[in-house]
Amino acid sequence: MPCEQHTDARKYCPNNTHTPLAAPLLQDGNLLGFSPHTPLELPLYLTPVAAGFPSPADDYIDQTLDLNEHLVAHPAATFFVRACGDSMLGAGIHNKDILVVDRALNPKDRDVIIAALDGELTVKRIRNKNGHVWLLPENPDYKPIQVGPEACFEIWGVVTYVIHKV
């Protein structure tokens, strides 16, 4: 199923800016809510890791770390979504990466956002320029998208972290 198919979440059309439309919702399970009831504390080593030879004289564990505390600032407003495609490679977002998205943040110029544009979800960098809204890819193979006044457009949230398998 293509990644742009969705049916949940509210979006607004500029022609009727306060009426929620059909809610985009990913049908393939790639949109996941955050469950704050799954703490998982893992060891955090005291010494930063250099890209060279590690020092065997360094101490080991400083404390434990719960990734939920570091990746999720607003649990009730956070969801995860899997990236699809290569239009954001320059921002470090690869195909199948998991994006942590915070709906509580107000998107600022140049933030990486998840948006619904004419019924399709996309991840792009938002740019406000000369009174126009642009969605900018971070790959020269793709063209910027100007959000026209006729477009149904809603920002779902700001991407705060990318979980990328190495």
Image: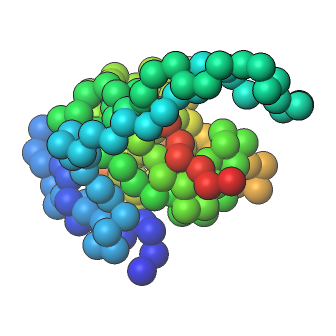
Residue found 66% across the figure and 39% down from its top: 91
Relative to 1, is 14 above or below?
Answer: above
Which residue sits furthest right? Answer: 52
Which residue is at the front of the view, 133 or 163? Answer: 163
The image quadrant of residue 30 is bottom left
The image quadrant of residue 19 is top left
Q: Where does the image place residue 1, in percent across and percent down from the top left?
A: 42, 80
Which residue is at the front of the view, 152 or 49? Answer: 49
Q: Where does the image place residue 126, in percent across and percent down from the top left?
A: 51, 33
Q: Where does the image place residue 12, in percent across and percent down from the top left?
A: 22, 45
Relative to 5, is 86 above or below?
Answer: above
Residue found 77% across the figure and 20% down from its top: 57
Q: Can residue 151 be seen from the camera position used here? A: no
Relative placement, left or right, of 61 versus 103 is right
Which residue is at the front of the view, 49 or 88? Answer: 49
Which residue sits furthest front? Answer: 57
Residue found 31% across the figure and 69% down from its top: 29
Q: Can residue 102 be seen from the camera position used here? A: yes
Q: Where does the image place residue 161, in percent across and percent down from the top left?
A: 49, 36
Residue found 23% across the figure and 34% down from its top: 75
Relative to 86, is 128 above or below?
Answer: above
Q: How is the image coloured?
A: rainbow
Relative placement, left or right, of 20 versus 103 is left
Where's the C terminus, which quadrant?
bottom right
The image quadrant of residue 103 is top left
